[in-house]
Amino acid sequence: QFEFVESGGGLVQPGGSLRLSCAASGFTLGSRHIGWFRQAPGKEREGVSCISSSRAGYYADSVKGRFTISRDNVKNTVYLQMNNLKREDTGVYYCALFRSVYHCATMKEGNVVGSWGQGTQVIVSS
């Protein structure tokens, strides 16, 4: 059984930055496609970004140019660097595992493998 532990969230002003971390236990990330989802209050969970096993990054249109996904396979961790944060980035952020590059690129909740972790909350507010 595997699980993700998300961390790095917090309260930040608009225009600020945060770096989220997704640590995996129970399996090695190296050969996996790992994504980030978020869920804003009262809204459905949506895909934000995904990184393939070959380190190709995919992004939702709403975060392109502001967010950068990366991975450190030695630390078994995936990161999401979030810059120029906007109020609409507020939400709980979760890690996700995908079985294929196609699923990683399209970031649909129905293609996520396993269950959701606790997530990490991001609040963008002045």
Image: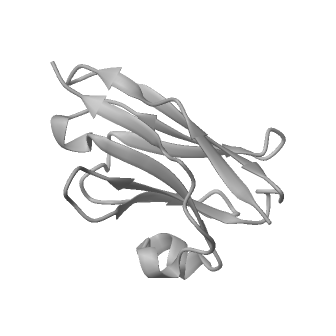
Quadrant placement of the N terminus: bottom right
Q: Residue drawn 37% across and 53% down? A: 38
- Name the residue rendered at 76%, 57% in the picture: 29
Marks counted in the figure total 0
Percent of width and height locating residue 64: 32, 50
Locate residue 43 relative to residue 67 in the image: left or right: left
Q: Is residue 93 above or below residue 52?
A: above
Q: Nearer the viewer, residue 54 or 85?
A: 85
x, y (%) of residue 70? 59, 44
The residue nearer to you, when weighing 105 against 89, is 89
Residue 73 is at least partly visible in this image: yes
Please tell me in which quadrant of the rendered image residue 16 appears.
top left
Q: Is residue 93 left or right of residue 40?
A: right
Q: Residue at x 66, y 45 (%)?
A: 71
- Residue 67 place in picture, x, y as percent: 39, 42
Task: Tell me where residue 15 appears, x and y as whole percent.
Answer: 23, 23
**Residue 48 falls in image quadrant:** bottom left
The vertical placement of 105 against 25, above or below, is below
